[in-house]
Amino acid sequence: MSDSFTLPLRPLLEKRERPDTLPQEIAQINAQWGSFRDVTEESLRAKIEEEKNRDPWAEEDEIDKATADVDTAERMDQLYKRRAEITQFAMQAHMEALFALDFVSLLLSKHTPRQAELSMSAYLKQVAPLGSLNAEIVNPPPKSDAALQDIKTVSRGWRLQNFNAAANKLLKSATRLETEVAAETKYWNEVLAVKDKGWKVCRLPRDRQALGVQYGFLEATPIFRDRGLAALRRADDGSLLLDKGLIPQRARTVRVRIRTQGQYTGCSKVSWSLPSADSIESRILQARDTVYEEELFHEMVRESRIMGSQGVTTRQNLVQVPVSDEQEVLLDLVDVDQSEPTDTETHSNEHDTLADAVAHSVRILLAYAHRQNLWRRTQPPPPLSQKRRHTPEYQLLRPVMAYLQHTAHVRSLESFMNDLRKVMKAAGLRCDFTSAPFSSVRLPQTRSSMPKVETLVKQFLMPFESMFTGNLITPESSFCVKVRTNTVSSSSGTYYEISVNLPHHREVQPPSRIGLQTEAAAAIIHFAMLDIVTAISHKGTKSPKEGADAGKGVLRWEVAYAHHGELRALSSSGNNKKMKVRLSREELTIQTFPLRGLDGSRGVDEDKRSANLRSQSWTLDSSVPRPSVMEFVEEVSQDRP
Amino acid sequence: MHELLLFASVPAHQHHELLQQLAGLTAMQPRHRLERRLVFKASRKPGLVTTRVGASQDLQGADMQRLNKMLNGGMYFTQVVGAVTEADLGATSSATDVDVSMSGTDGPSYCYENQSWKLEFRDIPEAGTRSAVTTRLMASASLPKGDIAVPMNAWGYSFVTEYMVEGDVFVQNDIVIFLHRVLLYPPAGPQEAHGPRRSLPAYHELTPLERTGSYVLQAAITVQDGGNQEMMKTASQHLFGLREQLKSAVRLEQADRLSLDTRAK
């Protein structure tokens, strides 16, 4: 457009038909420089150089220098003096203005007395009556032609000068406008690029002139929701600046570390690669991530306050969550760039996956909490009352902690059961169990109206339950252990529900809830022991049935004190025997010794007793093949001392 | 509970635009609602009220006074509201007949027996309030499912008429914004005039009460304790805030008190 349209701005200077006459110029030079003899080329050049080099502000600088020398007291003095001067000038101007007003008022009072009276001062009203001054137009005397010519020339010069100045200003502003337009174009192109990427661009609510981009999360806590809006400001060259106000520009993220037995054994990934570090898109993304991470940490700290009873501790910038006796999870907010732990503590990567999993889980759970917030917000609100609605703490750490605790419990119970099974196997007893970890977690059905993601996450906010079922040695007897972990804080923690089906000890039932793992293990061992005792006593009853001759010389074991693992065999020939079954996680021991006291023979010395004591134990890692329990029982069942 | 209200009339051509604006303002998607509303009128059975009059000043406790007031007070129209879905409209009625419901696999069906209901009582708006919002006493209660005419009759209400309300709900903080219009059923046979319909006509058969098809924008906020002046003031401040925000789109204002009169003469 600017090419096709040109407008001459500078005034056209008419070439004078004839330049100044030579005599006139000579007269001028004589007046300015004196004699022609002094005017040489060198002197003129020197003069021009001097003019050029002279600083236009030189005089003022000198004054400044002078003032710089004076000390502060003097400057203060000078300051006051100047101020007084300024005030004086202002006063004087004021006075003069008032005089002028009075004068004009008095002049006008002849024609419009009422209006003029209003603007008259009180003093004037006293001393001069209204309408006492009149004005008349007087024709000035005619001026001479030369004077008229002068005035004409001067005014023409002035006009030319003003035209020039105006043209200069216009041209300058044209160039300024051009750069401005270029900058604006660049700015708007970048804004459009941001908008095309799908970001929400809007006006700022407080600063209506500025554009902002919304990158935060609408459902976040208000302070973080409001931080999700940053102004898109224009730099002088038109590039886009993301102005987040007072919020620090650093990118921060939540770091998860695992500490096992006082040593760091895992750390989550902290820095992730941004597409290109300096584009506006990446800056918006980084701002979004930071606000999300900070909210995450804020909410975790808030949640950890109500989890104090479960051993969760908070520091200024650290949340410690104990998972098991030797393991704890540490969460803190770190700058992205100082990602790598500078700690000199021994650091292994054993649990990096776990740390990453925890880091991902808490983020997913925060997103889920946001969705819950949206759902809650769009429900019809309860009636307005004075009670303020409490926003519940999000479930971030609790599900993670419950999951980890549950896993730890299930694992240790499983290893305990495996040990027990090995002991049993070594003893030739068949005892099998199946485990169903996290049997309560069911993948969502498709029919539900909720989004699939939400139903999936919801599963992990319910109490966790794992189940162990197994058969014991005697037929029809079985056991079932349910491990439950609640996520909500009211009844948090893990407890065991053991149910046993022992047909021979129907009256025996475990306590309904067992809180400690050692107690649960003790209960299982006790039932297994009861079962072994029952099996041994059954074997005794079975064998005589097989044949009449087999019953001869074979003792029958009867249960004496089942809960102490004691059996007794009464013999007609006086070889009464006692058997004691001991079962622990590591080994199964069966001891038999002659029953003392029934025959009343105190004379049996200790040596003989100990000689008759027979013992057999089956341990966890027995490589040496040993007779099975039943073989051993058969052997000791012989009716001989 | 008290309810504070502001209303605005929205011409049909502005409806879509306003939906967009409200969705932006409340940052949520509109929740479409289709409600059938039954109007019941309370009637006093003659000879039922026997209260002792006089000579019982000392015996008449507060409860008794309240009971008397309730029994002898004015009679009101009440509404019974049941939410339906668009699939229910024009669907075949699956009545109590088992055979029909067994064989009725060919398409959606509307089950009147499973319709859930809510009783909504609204008093006449308070008179002489200085505030520029409509304020009225309100109460809601859920009712048993199914045929509602029988229990309502037993409680002393008689069926008057019914209509349909179609609209979208938005929630902004404490304010429930309901952009809706009233739809009338096509004239029915004489057998259906005495009770609620058991089947619903198709959507296109319904005619808007307002011929031009315009909508009503209702902004409501409920307050638990109407006696608490501070709460009431806060609530009306919230409504005024909304009015300011919507100023460029619609003009929310107080409703004519007598047009919301629910008293039965």
Image (cartoon, rainbow, N blue to C red):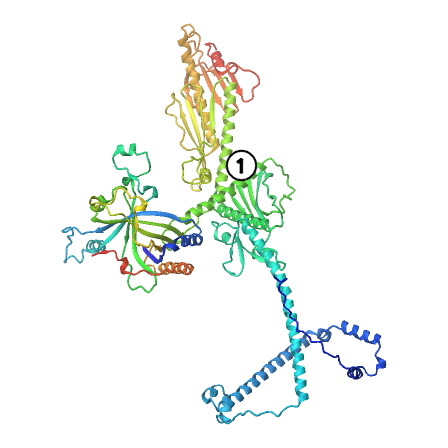
Q: Position of residue B196 (x, y in %)?
A: 24, 45
Residue plotted at (54% across, 85% down): A98
Q: Is residue B22 visible?
A: yes
Residue B29 screen position, x and y as percent: 42, 49
The residue shown at (37%, 47%) is B32
Is any atom of residue A597 visible in this view?
Answer: no
The front one of B192 and A449 is B192
Q: Residues within 10 Å of mark 1 (few under 14, many from 20)?
A: few
Of the pair A183 and A372, the residue shown nearer to us = A183
Quarter of the figure with the N terminus of chain A: bottom right
| Count of number-bearing discs | 1
A288 lies above or below A143: above
- Residue B170 placed where, x, y %? 39, 51
Mark 1: which amino acid?
Asp
Q: Position of residue A572 (x, y in %)?
A: 41, 9
Q: Which residue is mark 1?
A: A325
Q: Is residue A62 above or below residue B208?
A: below
**Which residue occupies the foreground of this view, A33 or A435?**
A33
Farthest residue toward the front?
A17
